Image (cartoon, coloured by chain):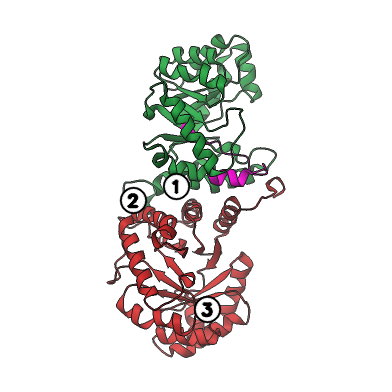
Chain colours: A red, B green
Amino acid sequence: MRIVADNLHVVRPEIARALEALDPEPVQALVRRCVQAGAQAIDLNCGPLKRAPERRMTFLVEAVRDVTDLPLLLDTTNPAALAAGLSACGGQAIINGFSLEPAKLEGILPLARQYDADIVGYLLHPDSRVPHAADELMALAVALFEAYRALDLDPARLIVDPVVAPLAWPDGTRHNRAVLTLIRQLPELLGTPVRTMAGLSNLASGALPLARKIALEQAFLPMLAAAGLDLLLVNVLHGPTLATARLCTDLLAEGIFAWASA
Amino acid sequence: MRIVADNLHVVRPEIARALEALDPEPVQALVRRCVQAGAQAIDLNCGPLKRAPERRMTFLVEAVRDVTDLPLLLDTTNPAALAAGLSACGGQAIINGFSLEPAKLEGILPLARQYDADIVGYLLHPDSRVPHAADELMALAVALFEAYRALDLDPARLIVDPVVAPLAWPDGTRHNRAVLTLIRQLPELLGTPVRTMAGLSNLASGALPLARKIALEQAFLPMLAAAGLDLLLVNVLHGPTLATARLCTDLLAEGIFAWASA
């Protein structure tokens, strides 16, 4: 399981200001902290970038690239910003992401072919509704995979994200059980191994105390890991959550570990 | 998932002395602590009880029954002690347990019929070896179930324990991955829902620091819970482990919870 930092997010005021002012320092300071905390990839969540999308995304990619060579996920709904970011990365970034929403299928999915890039596909209904039952997620995964394959793209480049729901939602618990089932059954469902990603910070979003957020993350994370999750999108500055992620990787490893000395 | 305390164990010097002296106080003090910590059942692990097995087991059951009505698991390899304990409990205890070892099939399994009791069945080879690969566990589960059904016993009274292995064992990690698979697939494998139990304290046994033991327990427990485990045998005085168990039960619940207020 690879750890993707979700920390570089435009909802953080210092990141919003840095994007506005094209000031690399706050971005780079945060990325350095994420790398030190154990991030193995960085999600660049810059929002829709309504003004000067190409310039701002290029700035962001270059700012981050100056301090790390880790894989980057370009996380925006703006196709122009994605294209600029993919160019700035030399095509080595992951597009985050598309779904069955028509605007995403038309504006974003083709970029995966154009830039020969990995892409994240979210299991959402075409009208953006979040599904809840396991069979609904299964049907969306099949439809998403068909839309992806219709462009003759390589299944090995697709990453399916079944969208962890906030527990505060009325159907949150049921939805997240379906997420676990989806992750476990996806390879059999699609007939080919397709990677999966899940955003753990969604689980305990809202006004919960930090200790409770982290406890919930620590309890759900091993369930995701044991289901076979490939990419965990997480706040890497939640130290105990990261420690749990490392233990899960060890507990599920194929190799043999010298536990007594760890 | 129901929490079974594994604390009442003859390896504790104060419990060994209490059993020797037939002194109920240390037993009852420990049971009260377990109940307060959240135990939902108590395992009475009194060892083989080579001397005066009936008298000691009866003493133990009566000592515990004086302070709690929780379900009891009678955990000994001694059939005479089991019979005495089952009599003392009025047949309401769980036999812990049998396996494919001939002495267990002949001496212990028939007690389940005689006392109309639930019984734990361990997935061990007939020569007591611990299996490692998932297909080995599956084959043992089928053989155990057949031996159980050969006595015309009710599948609903059987509890299968696939035996969590110490991580310090060379094959411990691989074995425990197989344990998760077994728990998840058991109902389909046997064609009927059969309950499962797992002993979490085995995972990090040995000379590890307590904090590391608890961290490993907290990481593996949600994997067991998500696989569908029914009974978790655990040191209930490991507070963070118990807190994780409660979160797992909530995360996997069918109902809807008011998370924000929890």
B68, B232: nearer the viewer? B232
Residue A243's disc is none
Q: Nearer the viewer, mark 2 or mark 1?
A: 1
Residue B15 place in picture, x, y as percent: 61, 21
Give above or below for A235 relative to A23. Answer: above
The type of residue carrying mark 2 is Ala
Residue B226's disc is 1
The residue under the point 39% across, 46% down is B250
Look at the numbered disc 1 and give the secondary structure of its residue.
Answer: helix
Subunit that carries the residue with mark 3: A
> Would you name the residue on which mark 2 appears?
B258
Q: How far is disc 2 from disc 1 in space, using C-alphas?
A: 21 Å
Q: Which residues are magenta?
A: B160-178
Look at the numbered disc 3 and give the secondary structure of its residue.
Answer: loop
Whether residue A120 appears in magenta in the rendering, the answer is no
Quadrant for residue B187, please give it.
top left
Q: How far is disc 2 from disc 3 in space, using C-alphas?
A: 39 Å
The N terminus of chain A is located in which quarter? bottom right
Whether residue B168 appears in magenta in the rendering, the answer is yes
* Mark toward the start of the polypeptide (2 vs 1): 1
Subunit that carries the residue with mark 2: B
Q: Is residue B66 visible?
A: no
The type of residue carrying mark 1 is Ala
Residue A93's disc is 3
Give above or below for A214 relative to B203. Answer: below
